[in-house]
Amino acid sequence: MVRAQSGRVPELVVAVSGALAGSTVPQWSREFDRVARTGADRLVVDLSACPRIDTAAIVILLRLHRQMKRSGGRLVLRHPAPAVVRLFMVARVDQVLTVEDSPAVQQPSAET
């Protein structure tokens, strides 16, 4: 078996298109599990093209968060729609999951 010298991938991005709800949840769950096993330091789930999620999706995102944390990585949810953010808040997972509203959030301001 050949491994990279560093042993980890710095960042992987998975873009979810369409709703992450109902019959799509098992498929996305398998995809998230596959990607998490790559050993990324940071796994970004881009939700900008995902208009809605359901509670089953929240469960798999929480499981993915725990899986990444156990392996020393980090899960980041990027650009969720307002309806998705509201569901995160109602379910109180906004207190657990890391959500990026926009790339500018992480960049320091040029004004000092």
Image: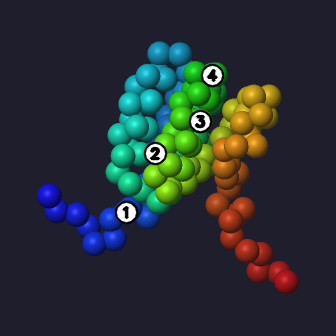
Residue for point 77% across, 80% down:
110
Residue type, numbered disc 2:
Val
Q: How many residues crowd mark 4 within 10 Å: few (<14), some (14–19), many (20+)?
A: some
Residue 44: % across, % down? 52, 51
Task: Please report whichever mark, 4 or 2, sits nearer to the chain's N-terminal start.
Answer: 2
Look at mark 4 in the image and give the residue it sits on: 54
Q: Which mark is residue 8?
A: 1
In the depicted structure, whether residue 16 falls above or below residue 76: above
Residue for point 44% across, 22% down:
26
Residue type, numbered disc 1:
Arg
Which residue is situated farthest in the left direction here?
1
Which residue is situated farthest in the bottom direction here?
112
Look at mark 3 in the image and give the residue it sits on: 62
Cα gap from disc 1 to disc 4, whole angstroms:
31 Å
**43 displayed left or right of 34:** right
Which element carries disc 4, helix, strand or loop? loop
In the depicted structure, whether residue 26 falls above or below residue 45: above
Look at mark 2 in the image and give the residue it sits on: 14
Cα gap from disc 4 to disc 3, whole angstroms:
13 Å
Task: Please report whichever mark, 1 or 3, sits nearer to the chain's N-terminal start.
Answer: 1
Residue for point 53% across, 16% down:
22
Residue 59: % across, % down? 59, 27
Which is in the foreground here, disc 1 or disc 2?
1
Q: How many residues crowd mark 3 within 10 Å: few (<14), some (14–19), many (20+)?
A: some
Which element carries disc 1, helix, strand or loop? loop
Residue type, numbered disc 3:
Leu
Which of the image's four quarters has the C terminus?
bottom right
